[in-house]
Amino acid sequence: MSASGHLIFDGRRVPVKPGQTVAAALWAAGIRSWRTTRETGAPRGVFCGIGVCFDCLVTIDGTPNQRACLAPASPGMVVTTQLGTGR
Amino acid sequence: MTSPPLGPSRPSPSGRYHVAVVGAGPAGLAVAATAAAAGCRVALLDAAPAVGGQYWRGRDPGVRLSGVDVMTGSAVWFVSPGFVLHRRGSDPVAAERLVFATGAYDRTLPFPGWDLPGVVTPGAAQAMLKGCGVPIGDRVVVAGAGPFLLPVAAGLLEAGVRVVGVYEAGDPTRYARAPAAVAGARGKAREAMSYLATLARHRVPYRTRHAVLAARGVAAVSAVEVGQLDRSGALVPGSVRPVECDAVAVGYGFTPQLELPLALGCATRLDTDGSLVLAVDFAGQTTVPGVYAAGEVTGVGGAALAEVEGRLVGAGVAVATGHRSPLSEMELTRLLRRRSALRRFAALMHRVHAPPAGWPEWLTENTIVCRCEDVPVHRIRAAVTGLGATDGRAVKALCRPGMGWCQGRICGYPVAELTARWRGRPLTAADLAVFAHRPIAQPVRLGDL
Ligand SMILES: Cc1cc2nc3c(=O)[nH]c(=O)nc-3n(C[C@H](O)[C@H](O)[C@H](O)COP(=O)(O)OP(=O)(O)OC[C@H]3O[C@@H](n4cnc5c(N)ncnc54)[C@H](O)[C@@H]3O)c2cc1C
Ligand code: FES
């Protein structure tokens, strides 16, 4: 279980509550998108919420293509917007 | 990440379990508990960090799992011969019998603007709220089809969110025309009534035969267009009006997660709701001997049906591995009756909440259909009507829908439907199977290969 604190999203402090996913922490801070698509550069955030659609891909602590809706949020985590598919 | 065994169960000397269950939702939990009660050595695997599946989502399901080796954090990505389950980050698990109880996910239909941030599935709204305590918005529209829209809306209201409207594409008054099927699932009717009462108390409009046709917004959704549908599911001209909101939960029922059983060659069928589901016999065995299925994978019917199916399959695999059935004659009869009643109700539910026939009319040529590969309607239309693609496989090869990260989980149904319609024929199981076959069920790291 992750504890309370903050994660860093694109240089901004975002509060994290225990049991939250990265997507939930970002959403609670009013952030609705953290990725752009490869072809059209359209913004994307959560869609299915359960790890099926891969819309919510994000870079966490330097590792790209993490599903924000599944990844548990923890204090000190560094989360960055992902362009395209991170490759 | 294997949890310590909760009971005396250990793999047999050959290292094989009697039964391995993939998926620890209501169905998988019931299979595991029932088989273990009969004396089977059981492994229960789930990708999630806790058991419970979509229904319990981390809350305690209150199922006794003594004698079951519970392996959470175990995403199964491949099954090799001898029923060996390969999971991410841990040793493989082998068993004499396999049970797939991998559940379902929201089925969605494309519409202009459905890829705007803030447009999510009802399941996502539920997962964010129930799992993480975060409502999807402050002014929310809930739409699509199916009884699940009601608990989603009621949950948001109880969390203090303003639900601006619930738009159900189906016509629930049709339930009244099948009183026998409804009587077999009284609990469900009562549950729906209590949610409707919550909606009424908060003065939330619940509009049936209505659908969200488009979402508007710049960086995120700021309004949707809602229209009325006629009896055939076509849009009533002149009925479209805007509804302001900052989030939309929209989905048309659920569709099963089938890649593992498909990779093993298990046969499928087209269910009454137009979903691809596993074909199973009376005992829940698939067409591959020794491979069983329970819960939403055999047809979407909700948590109660999943649990009943799970208990029956658990007893069946126990007997098949040389154990005495843990169910008395009376329990068995009761469970079989309950299963037929709940399946009858599910079939009725599928007919009442079918995806509206007119949905392709709401698309524009530039509406994205495949969210992963950014494939718009006009590229799929060109493949089918211009280049002569006759099935999903050809469409996929020509313009890549279903070839991205989600491997067709999201766009499979709409692309298959559009292809069939534009070829002037009905949707078939084969159309859907093209998008449901995925050689690797879960993303893997190089180290797992
Ligand atoms: C997002 C969502 C939210 C829902 N919320 C509700 C609700 O609040 N109330 C309600 O009545 N119904 C809800 N439902 C409907 C729900 O699916 C069923 O009622 C019920 O949970 C079905 O039980 P099941 O055991 O068949 O599947 P599930 O409960 O879906 O369980 C399937 C399990 O299999 C696991 N799994 C899948 N693939 C793999 C793999 N490759 N490796 C390892 N594990 C795997 C999943 O992690 C999951 O835990 C929801 C459905 C969804 C999709
Ligand atoms: S929102 Fe669909 S995978 Fe995360």
Image: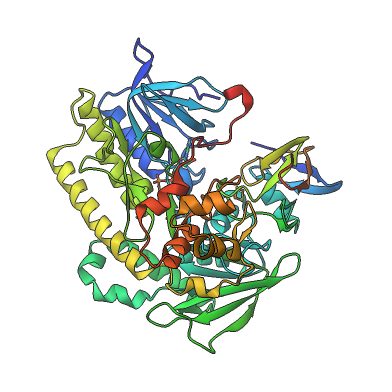
Colour style of the rendered protein structure: rainbow
Front position in the image: B202 or B343: B343
Quarter-of-image position of residue A21: top right
Q: Is residue B132 left or right of residue B222?
A: left
Q: Is residue B329 left or right of residue A13?
A: left
Front position in the image: B5 or A79: A79
Number of numbered callouts drawn:
0
Q: Residue furthest right?
A: A11
Q: Is residue B321 left or right of residue B375?
A: left
**Residue B401 can be seen in this image:** no
Q: Which residue: 44% across, 40% down?
A: B259
Front position in the image: B156 or B166: B166
Q: Which residue: 53% across, 87% down?
A: B239
Q: Residue furthest top?
A: B13
Q: How far across and how far down the image is residue B40, in percent?
A: 29, 24
Q: Which residue: 60% across, 67% down?
A: B248
Q: Which residue: 53% across, 77% down?
A: B204
Q: Is residue B46 left or right of residue B331?
A: right
**Residue B128 can be seen in this image:** yes
Q: Residue furthest left?
A: B329
Q: How far across and how far down the image is residue B116, in percent?
A: 67, 63
Q: How far across and how far down the image is residue B125, in percent?
A: 57, 58
Front position in the image: B368 or B9: B368
Q: How far across and how far down the image is residue B30, in percent?
A: 33, 39
- The quarter of the rendered structure image containing the N terminus of chain B is top right
Q: Above or below — where is A34 with respect to B141? A: above
Q: Residue furthest front?
A: B387
- The quarter of the rendered structure image containing the C terminus of chain B is top right
